[in-house]
Image (cartoon, rainbow, N blue to C red):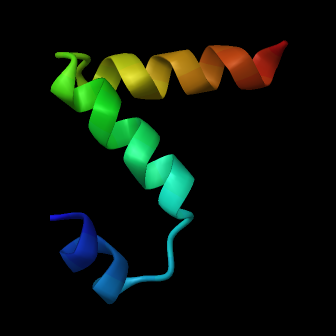
Amino acid sequence: MLTAILDEKELDTEWVELIMEARNLGISVDEIREFLQQSSKT
């Protein structure tokens, strides 16, 4: 799956791995997005 994502666009592999790990732990895309938005405000 990671290879397919990277083939389509140039993405930072560390970020892709981090997001995939979060998803494997059961964290939703919305929770990830909310966390990143809150982090950028501080």
- How far across and down, in percent of the image, does residue 30 sit? 31, 24
Front residue of 22 and 41: 22
Task: Tell me if 1 is positioned left or right of 6 in this view.
Answer: left
Instruction: Report the quarter where the N terminus lies.
Output: bottom left
- How far across and down, in percent of the image, does residue 18 sit? 44, 38
Residue ID at (25%, 64%): 2
Task: Tell me if 40 is positioned left or right of 9 in this view.
Answer: right
Residue at the right extreme, as displayed: 42
Does residue 31 sit above or below 1 in this rendering?
Answer: above
- How far across and down, in percent of the image, does residue 12 sit? 56, 64
Task: Tell me if 14 is positioned left or right of 31 in this view.
Answer: right
Q: In which quarter of the image is residue 5?
A: bottom left
Residue ID at (53%, 16%): 35
Instruction: Report the quarter where the C terminus lies.
Output: top right
Residue ID at (20%, 77%): 4
Residue ID at (40%, 47%): 17
Q: In which quarter of the image is residue 28?
A: top left
